[in-house]
Image (spheres, helix red, strand yellow):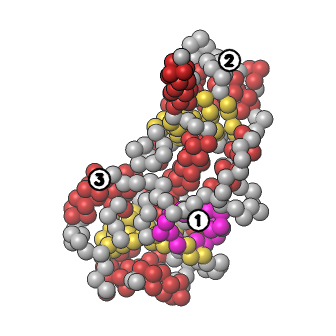
């Protein structure tokens, strides 16, 4: 009889565990690369604290598509594939069909954390109604950006909001000793091939430099990056300048490209996935407050980030090898700084 009860107890426990593993979570993240990466600790916390079997991200897939298989995110879905604008109407005017694609879109999730909409807004009320049409679901509305007087890191800010709304015990501050994104063996192999095709010597020391950012005021004066690249080149270190669409527009004229080509290689037109693959093969990275800098840091690359107007205490990149240099100079984006160059070079060459 005792053995029979033990078997039943074991089956009940296994059934409960299987039910928990079937519960999934969703994060609605409308931001760009950096925002998606800084959401990863929140996703990991949700998974563990709420005992979810998986967690998806609903966002812009050109930024988040690299995450499944390399991070705690299990799947991504496209914001552009859903008519989420319907959720902004007044609740009394909100209607759902039978069946309705919005109901289907949220039917798989027991927990939904959204950075779209505001607390007590029409969007939140309509999302709660939609999510609960097919099953019982919890919807949490989180602020994406901390208030201006905030001095805690944005990752802690996100998790604290979730903890407060869920009534969970407060966690310790997020640890930065682990990589948030891990390149696969296939990534590394492809990265090596891309470097060979780009004219880099196999086995040589390589530093990637990304001189751009989403805002012009965040971009350290280009002469700084050129000077660092020239010094690295004089010591036998190869340099790869990564130029995305924004940098190609701003720095794409012939004269600037010729300056870069004298001290390194210019790589442009790469997909975000190929940038990740290339970063998996470099020895160091230098960049501004940008999404690519957050990517390099999250991968565990030795990352030197130069911050100007942005508060690094709130938005610094997270990773085991990330170092932030902050400048309050009003000429941060206009004039070179030999002093700051030396600081970065000291770390890059030791």
Q: Which mark is residue 185?
A: 3
Task: Decide: is 180 above or below 17.
Answer: below
Please tell me whether mark 1 sits on a helix, a strand or a loop. Answer: loop
Instruction: Residue 308: say if magenta.
Output: yes
Please tell me whether mark 3 sits on a helix, a strand or a loop. Answer: helix
Q: Nearer the viewer, residue 1 or 102?
A: 1
Looking at the figure, which quarter contains the C terminus? bottom left
Q: Name the residue at the front extreme.
A: 1
Residue behind mark 2: 95
**Upstream in sequence: badge 1 or badge 2:** 2
Task: Decide: is 275 above or below 28.
Answer: below
Looking at the figure, which quarter contains the N terminus? top right
Q: Nearer the viewer, residue 221 or 318?
A: 318
Tell me, yes or no, whether the two marked residues, 2 and 3, touch with CB atoms within 8 Å.
no
Residue 336 locus on image (x, y percent): 52, 83
Tell me, yes or no, whether the two marked residues, 1 and 2, touch with CB atoms within 8 Å.
no
**Upstream in sequence: badge 2 or badge 3:** 2
Q: Which mark is residue 144?
A: none
Q: Is residue 25 left or right of residue 161?
A: left
**Residue at 45% in and 81% down:** 347
Q: Which mark is residue 316?
A: 1
What separation in Å lies between label 1 and label 3 (alpha carbons)?
28 Å
**Residue at 31% in and 86% down:** 235
Residue 124 locus on image (x, y percent): 71, 33
Q: Name the residue at the top extreme.
A: 98
Question: What's the magenta region?
Answer: 305-323
């Amino acid at each position: 009889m005792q053995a029979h009860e033990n078997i039943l107890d074991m089956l009940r426990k296994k059934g409960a565990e299987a039910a928990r593993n079937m519960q999934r979570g969703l994060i609605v993240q409308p931001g760009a690369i950096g925002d998606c990466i800084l959401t990863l600790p929140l996703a990991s916390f949700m998974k563990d604290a709420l005992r979810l079997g998986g967690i998806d991200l609903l966002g812009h897939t050109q930024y988040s598509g690299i995450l499944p298989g390399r991070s705690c995110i299990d799947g991504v879905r496209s914001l552009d594939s859903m008519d989420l604008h319907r959720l902004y109407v007044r609740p009394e005017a909100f209607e759902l069909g039978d069946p309705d694609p919005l109901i289907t879109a949220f039917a798989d999730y027991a927990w939904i954390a959204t950075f779209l909409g505001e607390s007590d807004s029409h969007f939140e009320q309509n999302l709660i109604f939609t999510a609960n049409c097919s099953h019982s679901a919890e919807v949490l509305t989180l602020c994406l950006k901390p208030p201006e007087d905030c001095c805690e890191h944005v990752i802690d800010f996100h998790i604290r909001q979730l903890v407060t709304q869920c009534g969970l015990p407060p966690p310790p501050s997020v640890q930065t000793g682990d990589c948030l994104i891990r390149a696969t063996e296939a990534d590394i192999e492809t990265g090596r091939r891309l470097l060979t095709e780009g004219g880099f010597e196999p086995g040589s020391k390589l530093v990637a430099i990304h001189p751009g950012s989403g805002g012009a005021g965040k971009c350290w004066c280009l002469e700084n990056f050129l000077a660092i690249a020239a010094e690295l080149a004089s010591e036998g270190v190869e340099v790869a300048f990564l130029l995305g669409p924004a940098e190609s527009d701003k720095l794409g004229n012939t004269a600037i490209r010729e300056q870069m080509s004298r001290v390194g290689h210019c790589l442009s037109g790469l997909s975000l996935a190929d940038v990740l693959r290339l970063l998996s093969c470099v020895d160091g990275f230098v960049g501004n407050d940008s999404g690519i800098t957050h990517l390099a840091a999250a991968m565990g690359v030795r990352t030197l980030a130069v911050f100007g107007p942005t508060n690094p205490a709130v938005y610094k990149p997270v990773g085991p090898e990330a170092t932030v240099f902050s400048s309050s100079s009003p000429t941060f984006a206009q004039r070179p700084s030999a002093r700051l160059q030396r600081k970065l070079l000291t770390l890059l060459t030791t």
